[in-house]
Image (spheres, rainbow, N blue to C red):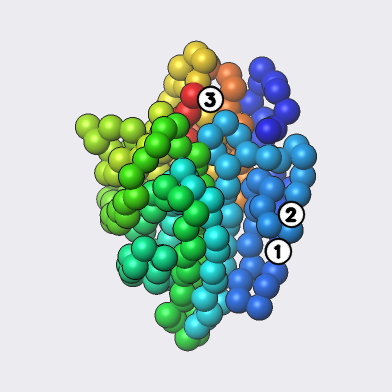
Amino acid sequence: MLANTTENIIHKYWKRGNSKMRCMESQHTFSFGGFFDVEQMGFRCLQVINDNYLYPGHEFSCQNHGNTEIITYVVQGTLEHQDSWGKKSLIEAGEVGISTATTSMSYKVLNPCRFKSTHFLNIWINTNHQIQPKYQHKYLPIEENSGKLLLLAASDNSNALMKINQDIQIYSCYLQAGDYIKYNVKPHRYGWLYMVRGVAVFNRKLLVMGDSVQIIDSQPLTITSEFSAEFLLFDMP
C-alpha cells in the first residue's frame, strides 16, 4: 500500500510505471505486470489504474483473479471487449464497461480501427463479499453535464449508473473553462482522484493528464479548470 499520511499527496504522471508491447503502451499508477514499486501497491480497495493506448488493429489479452470489478473506461476511439464467459461488447469513447469477476477470468480487448490508437483506462477494484458474475455497459453523459459529478458506480443503484460490489462511489466529471466542483470526503473515508485528460486545479495545486491525488484529509475539496478537464474520483472506505 502507499505510505500512511494525514495529508493529501499528489502523484505526478511521470512517476507512473511504463510498459511497451507490440500491441500497446501503458502507464501504471500502481504496480502491475513488469512494473513493481513497493510504495505503489494500490490504495485501499483500488488496485489497478492502467492508462492504455492500444495500437490500431491490435488486441490485448489479460488474466484476472477472482472477486474483482474490472472497469474499462474508453477515453478516445473504440474498443471491442470479449471475455471467457462469452460476453462481447463494443465500447465507444464516453462509454464504460464493468465486468464483475467471481473467479479467475480471461478477457481481451481489440482495437477495430486500422489507423488510430484507442485510449482507455483499465481499473481493478477488490470486492468486499462473494459476488455473482455480471457485465454492465453504459454511456456516460459527462459533457452534457459539465461541472457536475456523475455517479458512475456505487454499491446501490439509487443514483448510480451501475452497481458495484464494494462500498465505493466512483464519480466521473467533465469541466469546461470556468467550471468548478466542491466535494467532501467524510471522516474515516478516503479518496483518489485521477486526471483523465486536460488541466485542472485541485485545492490550488495544478493537475495535468495522468496525475493522481491520494486524498486523506476530510476538509472540503475544490477542483476548477480554466481550460477543460476530465477526471475520475473514487470515494472509498
Check the image and report above or below for 147 versus 117.
above
Q: Is residue 57 left or right of residue 175?
A: right
Q: Residue at x 36, y 56 (%)?
A: 97
Q: Residue furthest top?
A: 187
Check the image and report above or below for 203 versus 199.
above
Q: Is residue 134 left or right of residue 49?
A: left
Residue position marked by numbered label 2 in the rendering:
35
Q: Nearer the viewer, residue 112 or 229?
A: 112
Name the amino acid, label 1. Answer: Ser
Label 3 residue SS: strand
In whole angstroms, how far apart are the C-alphas of marks 2 and 3?
Answer: 25 Å
Which mark, residue 190? 3
Q: Residue at x 45, y 37 (%)?
A: 127
Label 1 residue SS: strand
Q: Nearer the viewer, residue 74 or 198?
A: 74
Residue position marked by numbered label 1 in the rendering:
19
> Is residue 13 in sight in this rendering?
no
